[in-house]
Image (cartoon, rainbow, N blue to C red):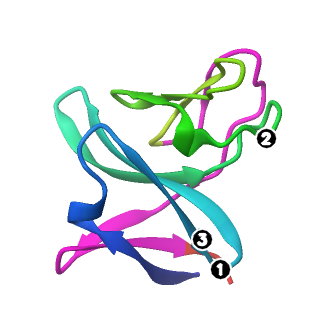
Amino acid sequence: MSWYDAAGVDEVAPGTTRMVDIAGKRLAICNAKCDTDEGFYTIDNKCTHDGGPLNQGFLDGCQIECPRHGARFDVRTGKVLRLPAVRPVHSYATRVTGGRIEVEVGD
């Protein structure tokens, strides 16, 4: 596993997502407010229902909704929260170092 520089913290505004390519993977970095916690979370950018681009979906707190058919996932864990998806998306460890968002991805 390696940490990769993904974006500056100012490049992902609160309540938005940004698609990045890291180590051959398309990922969605989400700047989400989850209850009292807020921060950056990273998941695969592909809905497990039909491959929709999650970065183009609606981010509501810790939930992201696929723009195609409305499947919802928890951006912290990738867990499915609403059908039609039945498989979770992969989530990645994410941290901020020196104003940069870093994501841990397997080599």
Q: Residues within 10 Å of mark 2 (few under 14, many from 20)?
A: few
Q: Residue at x 45, y 42 (%)?
A: 76
Name the residue: 66% across, 43% down. Answer: 53
Q: Please state which of the two labelled residues, at mark 2 or mark 1, is closer to the viewer.
A: 2
Disc 3 to disc 1: CB gap under 8 Å: no
User: For residue 8, which quarter of the picture?
Assistant: bottom left
Amino acid residing under circle 1: Ala
Instruction: Locate the N terminus by quadrant.
Output: bottom right
Q: Residue at x 56, y 51 (%)?
A: 43
Segment tinted magenta in the rendering: 77-104
Which residue is at a point 62% across and 27% down the rendered structure image?
67
Quickly name the residue at label 2: 51
For numbered disc 2, what is the local secondary structure? Answer: loop
Query: Mark 2 and mark 3: span between their CA atoms?
Result: 16 Å
Q: Quadrant of residue 103?
A: bottom left
> Residue 73 at x, y = what percent?
57, 30
Q: Please, what secondary structure does the residue beneath circle 1 have? A: loop
Amino acid type assigned to the residue bearing label 2 in the image:
Gly
Magenta-colored stretch includes residue 24: no
Identify the residue position indicated by label 1 in the image. Answer: 23
Q: Nearer the viewer, residue 87 or 67?
A: 67
